[in-house]
Every structure is written in structure tokens, then in C-alpha cells.
Image: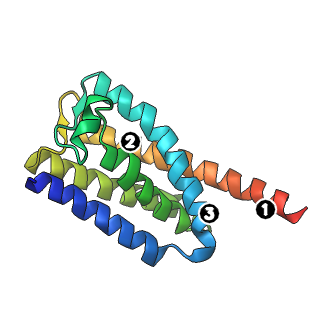
Amino acid sequence: MNNDRLILIGFSSLCIIAIFKLIPREKVRDAWVLFLFLQVITWPAGLFAVERGWIEYPTQLFPIANAYNRTSFSFEFFIFPIVAIFFSLYYPDKSKIKGALIYYISFAGFFTICEVVLEKYTTLVEYHEWKWYWTLLTVIISLFLNQKYYLWFKKRFVKVESR
């Protein structure tokens, strides 16, 4: 096992620990909704970017899956959706536009910085036509869509539950 796979295992382990430590029991259903909906976004977006040759994920946690799906299972289907859970569950509802913008940029910026570092020092991700600012923009858009869906879901679910 090479160091890059150990990094994926480490990030995945941290995510699993964070799920158990930071998601309140009464928010587990919400966490599942957020997790699954973000995968709906990342699946076609990731496939599109990889198939266009803009970005590549040479090292995979599950190399056999690379023959069928060349996106990063770890990033697109596990790590980023878990980041999105924490983004939405701890979203500052009362914040003004400036505060919300800082929140979005903080999360997306952290995720982007991690990806840029991984692109530079590992074989987990390779940029071809892709640039760091595309990651920043797509992460912000994904988090925005996920947050809006979550708000709609909560509003809809509360109406159904109160009947």
C-alpha cells in the first residue's frame, strides 16, 4: 500500500470519526439527506470533468472501481458529502449575506486548499485543464445547492410531520 492510499484512508477515518462525534442523534436523518443529495450533484459533475480530461484521479482507494468510474470515490462520494453535512448542519442561519459568504468561502477555500496540496504533492489528483479556482467555484455551487435542498427538505418535512 502506498502513501497516497494511506492519505485516503486517513481522511476517510477522520470523516467517520467526525460523523460519530459531531452529528447529533436527532440530526442523523438530516445528515443522510445531505449526504445523498450531494452525491447526486457530484456524480454527474465529477464524471463530466474526468471524461473531458480536465482532471484525473490516478490513485484510487479501490483501484478495481477505476475501470468503471474514473472519478474519485473517496472525494466525490464520501469526503466531500461529509464536509457538506457539517456545512449545512452548522450553517449560521441568522447570519447576514456577508457572514454567509464568509462561511461559504471558508469551507470551499479549505477544501480547495486541501485539493491543491494533494495535487502538488501526491498522485491522488492531477489537474490537466482544471484550475484551483474551478474547484473553489464548483464546491461553492455544490454547497449552495445542497443547502437550498436541505432547507426545502426541512420545510417540507416539518409540514408533513405537523399534520
Question: Is residue 98 shown to the viewer in this render?
Answer: no
- State the residue lying farthest toward the front: 64
Q: Nearer the viewer, mark 2 or mark 3?
A: 3
The residue mark sitting in front, 3 or 1, is: 3
Q: Single out the residue that lies furthest toward the right.
A: 163
First in sequence, mark 2 or 3: give its number. 3
Residue shown at 53% from the left, 49% from the top: 36
How far apart are labels 1 and 2 at the CA level?
32 Å
The x, y position of residue 2, in whole percent, is: 8, 53
Give coordinates of residue 110: x percent, y percent: 30, 58
Q: Quadrant of residue 9?
A: bottom left
Q: Is mark 3 on a helix, strand or loop?
A: helix
Neighbour tally class for label 2: few under 14, some 14-19, many 20 plus, Cα within 10 Å: some
Which mark identifies residue 138?
none
Q: Give me the residue at 55% from left, 46% from top.
A: 37
- Point out the tag, 3 or 1, that comes first from the N-terminus: 3
Kind of residue at disc 1: Val
Disc number placed over residue 29 in the picture, else none: 3
User: Residue 137: which disc?
Assistant: 2
Q: Residue, x 40% and y 40% (percent of image)?
A: 138
Q: Position of residue 76 (x, y in %)?
A: 37, 45
Whether residue 81 is visible to the viewer of this picture, yes or no, is yes
User: Regarding mark 1 in the picture, which secondary structure is present there?
Assistant: helix
Among the 4 quarters of the image, the one containing residue 103? bottom left
Residue toward you, 150 or 11: 11
In the rendered image, which residue does mark 1 sit on?
A: 158
Q: Which amino acid type is shown beneath numbered disc 3? A: Arg
Could you tell me the amino acid type at mark 2? Answer: Leu
> Alpha-carbon distance for marks 3 and 1?
13 Å
Q: Is residue 150 left or right of residue 80?
A: right
